[in-house]
Amino acid sequence: MRIAAVDLGSNSFHLVVAEVGPDGTFAPLVREKEMLRLGDVVSREGRVTDEAADAAVNTMRRFRLLAEAAGATEVLACATSALRTAANGDKVLDRIAEEAGIDADAIDGLEEARLIFGAIRAAVTIDPSPAVCFDLGGGSLEIMVGDAGGLVWAASERLGVARLSAQLVHSDPISKVDCRRLHEHIVEVLAPRAVEVAAYEPKLAIGSSGTFENLAHMVAARRDESVPRSLNQLTFSRAELRPLHEELLASSSAQRRRFVGLDTKRADLIVAGVEVLDVIMDLFAVDQLTISEWALREGMVLDALGRHDPEDWSDDPHAIRRSSVQALARRCSWPEAHSRHVAKLALDLFDQTRELHGCTDEDRELLEYAALLHDVGEHVAHDGHDRHAAYLVAHGQLRGFPPEEVVLLTALVRWHRRGVPKASDDLVGELSEKQRERVRRLAAILRVADGLDRSRKQVVTDLAARVNPSMVLLRLRTVGDPELELWGARRKRELFERVYKCDLELTAHPAG
C-alpha cells in the first residue's frame, strides 16, 4: 500500500509518497517540493492573487500525477496558515479540488501541531524527556511539549517567516530599527508561551521545518567536519548559532545567497527565521536544538495509518531506533534468522568480555543494530555486499539516530567482513581516530559472531567466554556438526586478537 501526503504550506508545498508495510511501518519513496511562498502574498494582499492561485493549482496537479505514477492509492492534503487565513482561501481549495483532483482540508494551528508532533516523536529519540518542539513555517510557529508517550501541550502563533518578513523587514540588510521591532514583536508574542512551557520542565529542544534545517546545515558546514547526509537528529548549540546570527543580520540578500547550506529561495526569509530562533533560545532557555527532518506531511501519513509499528508507540523513547532498523532490514529482504542469531551471539560475546573491551551500553546497542543490518547488502549483490550494506544504511533514513551514530553504524556494517576502518572512506566519510578505535573494537566482536553462524543453520546455540590475561576461551554449545562454524570464527578472529592483544580459542560441545 502506498499513501501520498501533501502539505500546502505558507512557504512551500511538499509531497511525500510512502510505502506502507503490513505492520504499519512506512518508508518515504518520493519527495517533491515547490516553493510558492503563498504566505508572502497573503501577508501583502490579505488574499491569494489569481497568479498565485494558478501556481498552486498547477503544483497540486503535478503532485497528483507524481503520486499516481508512484502507485499511491490514497492522497491526503492539509492546508496551513496562509490558506486558512487568506480571505479567499476556501475558494482556492475549491479550485484545487476541481482542477487538480485533490481535496485538501484547511487545518487549524493546534491540529497542525498535533500532526507535526506525531512525526517528530517517530523521527527523533525524545530522551531526556519531555521535549519542547518548534516548527517554524511561513505563516505560523507551532510550539509543542511532549514525550515518547504523546503530546501534552501545544500552541500556534502567527510568527511564520513569510509573515514576519512582509510585515517587519523593510530593508536589505535589515536596519537596526527593523531589527529592534522584529525582535520586540517576537518577544511580546513568545514570552507568555515560554512561561507556560517552563512549567513542564522540558529537558530537550527539537526543531523542524525548512528554516531550522537550513540554519542547521549552515552551522554544520562551519564545523571542522563533513556535513552529514541527513540532518535528522543533528544537534547544534546556541554558541554555534550566535556568530551565524550576527552574520545573517549584517548581510544583504545577495550576500546570503552565497552562504553554504542556505536554500537561495530563503535568502530574504532567513533573517526573520534566525531572529525567531534566537528569541526562542533566550526565552525558553534552550542551549541546544536537535533537528527533526520529519514534520507535517509525515505526521499526516502516520495519522492516516491508524496504527503503526507497536514499538513506535511505546513509552520507550529508544523504541523508534529498533523499529527503524528492522524496517530497513525488511525492505532489503534480510536473512532474518541468520541476522538475529548473529546479533544474539555478538551480544553474548560483548556481555561476557566487558572486562576486556570496556565498551559502553551505547556501543552494545550499536553492535546489535549492526549485526541485524550487516548482510542487507545481499539484497543488491552477494559480491561486495559489505559495501552495498553500508550504502543502504547510510541512505536508509534511520530514525532516532543522530548523524554521528549513523556514521558509526555505517562503518560497522562496512567493515564487518574484512579490512580496518580508514580515516576516510567514500561510503562512510571522515572518521576520527576515536571513532575508528570504537569501530575496530565492535567490528572485532561482530566478525567472530558472524563466523559462528557460517552455515546459517544456527548450529551454535550458546557461548561461554572465559577471559584470561593472554587468551579468551570460547566454549560453544552446539547442535549438529559445528565444523563450518569453528572454521568461520577462526578465520574471522584476527582483528579480535589484534585489537584486544590476546589469543582467541574455541571449543565445541554438543548441547545436552
Image (spheres, rainbow, N blue to C red):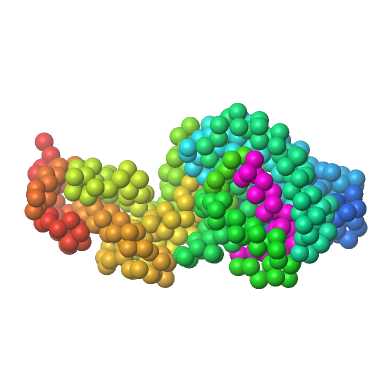
Answer whether residue 252 is magenta in the image: no
Quadrant where the C terminus is found in the figure: top left
Q: At 42% from the left edge and 71% from the top edge, which residue is drawn?
A: 426
Residue 170: image quadrant is bottom right
Name the residue furthest front. Answer: 176
Q: At 26% from the left edge and 55% from the top edge, which residue is drawn?
A: 441
In-image side of 94 versus 131 (left or right): right
In-image side of 151 versus 357 (left or right): right
Answer whether residue 266 is magenta in the image: yes
Range drawn in magenta: 261-283
Q: At 32% from the left edge and 63% from the top edge, which residue is drawn?
A: 433
Residue 204 visible to the viewer: yes
> Which x, y percent locates residue 241?
59, 55
> Which x, y percent locates residue 42?
86, 51
Residue 496: image quadrant is bottom left
> Which x, y percent locates residue 436?
32, 61
> Which x, y percent locates residue 63?
72, 57
Residue 284: image quadrant is top right
In front: 135, or 25?
A: 135
Q: At 24% from the left edge and 53% from the top edge, which residue is drawn?
A: 445
In front: 407, or 78?
A: 407
Is 361 placed above or below 199 here?
below
Magenta stretch mostly in which secondary structure? Answer: helix
In front: 43, or 416?
A: 43
Is 183 placed above or below 303 here?
below
Residue 380 visible to the viewer: no
Is 313 placed above or below 217 here?
above
